[in-house]
Amino acid sequence: MRNSWFISILPLLLAGCVSVAPRGLVRDPSADFPGPAPFANYTPPTDSRLYKATLEIKDHRLTGLLIIKYMAPLEPGSRRDHGSYRVVFTSEVGMTFFDLELKERHTRVMSCFPSLKKRALLHLLGSNFRKLTWESAPPAGRAYRQKSTGNLVMDGRRSKTRYWYVYSPAGDTLNGLSARSSASTAVKIGFSRYDKDQPGVITLENPLIGMKMTLKNLH
Amino acid sequence: MPEIDRIPGRKNGLYVLIRALLMLAPLFLPWIVFSQGKPMAPKDISVLRTRVKEAARATTTLACNFVQEKEMGMIAEKITSRGKFLLKKDKKLRWEYTEPFIYIIVIDHDQIAVKDENKVSRFSLQSNKVFLEVNRVILGSLQGTLLEDERNFSAAFYESKGGWMTRLSIRAPRLKETLDWIDIWFNRNDFTVDRLEMHEAGGDVTRITFSDKKLNQPIADEKFVVH
């Protein structure tokens, strides 16, 4: 009886262990306002951006090219339609692994390689790419300092998702972003090797399923 | 959760669009026929099959450059990559991308080595479905074996000024999930492959054009080893 009770709460315990939040934070109210204004910052593409991409899930590894493209709405200026983003991942030799359409409120799978046609995986990929498109702007939040690095961390919430934006100590460079609405969609995103104002390398990690995607900007 | 179906909620619009296209199709028929050439006579098909087979048999090595264009029609984007291609009998292939990224695939019989930047991965062809299909399609096109694979493909032959084209419609259910058809253009002089087009089920097209072909020149075995 005691064992069955333990087994039933085991998934909850494991989920609780998945943490993407930066550790060792100390409140810094002085940085709350006006907040960081980084000049090295990730912003979603207004047209398209091409990346060399690697997707690793446990022992499996896929490599190829990933394109993120903003598709303007059919009726410019429409209040209801703000356009969409298309995220297409293809192998180097041309075969499409997946093609996702990210509307403001929902994700649609346009095409997908048969072996990747797993609902949970596609949902997670859609959730990850939302953080690089529709949900990339930081919500209003409170400022913290990370004791070990001195990094400025802005902690905020949008809808059911909690976000931590990690900036350099001076607040001029966005180094990372963590987001969590549930254990399964918790993601840690790193931005590095800035070229001009955009990161040259972006890493997305989902600790629960051990998925990691690396994007290297080719433009 | 993401929806797996294609364009839900747009059935009416899509239906109207398809109907309109079908009604207008006769207007575009001459253009469609012209772009792929005119259908070949059965006796010419038989000659082409034989000549392609003979050319493949006579080719011990092939070295060429290639330009690969991935056209994503729905989002009006094209990704162009370039590289070098080496083929050596029997079942040795080196597929090297030099622009806009460095990526090398070497297939030596049933073993694959992939060099992605500085990382080398080795695995068996049978263990990787993606490379298994890529190898079957690309190597099979270049060696002409795809034309004989009636279990997985049905072939239609066309002739134009530029050369001969074979359209291989996919029969294999698993491959059909990703590819609709493959077009292969053969050179009029040496019956080697000039161009390969893979039309995906999602509407994307990958076009690979081969140039500067050198046939039966010595290629060292070391070229098929990746460090």
Image (tube, coloured by chain):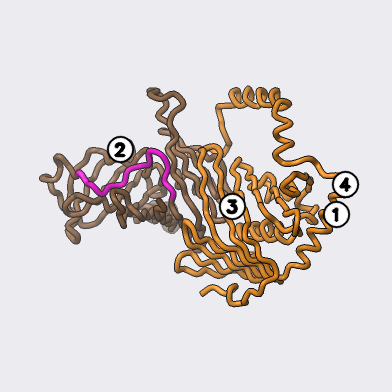
User: Chain ID for label 4?
Assistant: B
User: Chain ID for label 3?
Assistant: A
Instruction: Label 2, secondary structure: give it.
Output: strand
Q: Residues within 10 Å of mark 4 (few under 14, many from 20)?
A: few
Q: Which residue is mark 2?
A: A158
Q: Residues within 10 Å of mark 1 (few under 14, many from 20)?
A: few
Residue at 62% across, 66% down: B86
User: Chain ID for label 1?
Assistant: B
Q: Amino acid at mark 1?
A: Val
Residue at 29% across, 45% down: A163
Nearest to the observer: residue B15 or residue A48:
A48
Q: Are marks 4 and 1 on the same chain?
A: yes
Instruction: Answer whether labels 4 and 2 touch (C-beta < 8 Å).
Output: no
Q: Are marks 3 and 4 on the same chain?
A: no
Report the residue that reaches farthest toward the left: A30
**Going from the N terminus, do you reach mark 2 or mark 3 first?**
3
Q: Amino acid at mark 2?
A: Arg
Residue at 33% across, 38% down: A160
Vertical placement of residue A73 versus A13, above or below: above
Q: Which residue is mark 3?
A: A115
Name which quarter of the figure residue B64 lies in.
Answer: bottom right
Q: Which residue is mark 4?
A: B42
Q: Which mark is residue B47?
A: 1
Residue B102 placed where, x, y %?
A: 48, 62
SS assignment for the magenta stretch, majority: loop
Q: Which chain is orange?
A: B
Residue at 75% across, 59% down: B190
Q: Nearer the viewer, mark 4 or mark 2?
A: 4
Q: Amino acid at mark 3?
A: Ser
